[in-house]
Image: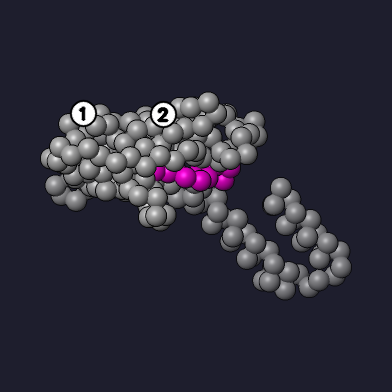
Amino acid sequence: VGLLCALAMAAWLWVRHYPMGLLVKNYAAPTALVYALFVTLYVTNTLPPIPLSLQKIGIYHNVLPQAGAYELSQQTPPWKFWSRGDETFQARKGDKIFVFARVFAPINFNDKIYLRWQKRGPTNKWLTTDRIPLSIVGGRELGFRGYAYKANYAPGEWRVSVETERSSEIGRITFDVYNDLSTEPRKWHLTYE
């Protein structure tokens, strides 16, 4: 549609007797360059798919589906408004790491997204441990919501990427996992999504 509008504009300028040399130099060449750049970035998976955007992502100790909502449990106090859940995850035996994501998808959009779990390895390289699919159907004004969890993990630096089937990244979160050897009761802060 954008290309058709650009061609219509060029035709209008041509009909108005805009000099051909100036038309190519000042309009056609820059327009073609911008379109070529966008197509190249899209084909090489540098740009995420346009209809999808990550609205929220966070790390939690628990995610419980409620009637029309999700209950998110975290240890990070609510006054740390810049935090996205428990980005410093204090893990005790039996804990699961939950990732919750909300992705905007347009009406009638029907596809899958994936949650790619990665851990930073000893050579500072990210090593993929899991790639979990989530089906999405667009149309909800506040975005599609979904979650996944990991029960088998080790302390260290982790990240979860939200990506398309073609592995184009929509967004990500990085977090640290530490062993919590304390036996004191933990205080949970609940939010609803």
Residue 105 is left or right of residue 47, and the answer is right
Give coordinates of residue 34: x percent, y percent. Answer: 59, 60
Give coordinates of residue 105: x percent, y percent. Answer: 58, 38
Check the image and report above or below for 92 versus 15.
above
Magenta region, main secondary structure: strand
Q: Give the range drawn in magenta.
A: 50-59
Q: Check disc 2 and report the residue beneath it.
A: 64
Q: Check disc 1 and report the residue beneath it.
A: 94
Give coordinates of residue 81: x percent, y percent. Answer: 42, 54
Q: Is tag 1's residue or tag 2's residue first in the polypeptide sequence?
A: 2
- Rate crowding at label 2 as few (under 14), some (14 to 19) or many (20 or more) other CA atoms within 10 Å: few
Residue 165 seen in the figure:
no
Residue 20 is left or right of residue 41, and the answer is right
The foreground one among 110 and 104 is: 104
Residue type (three-letter) at the residue carrying disc 2: Leu
Residue name at image x 48 percent, y 27 percent:
66
Give coordinates of residue 40: x percent, y percent. Answer: 50, 51
- Rate crowding at label 1 as few (under 14), some (14 to 19) or many (20 or more) other CA atoms within 10 Å: few
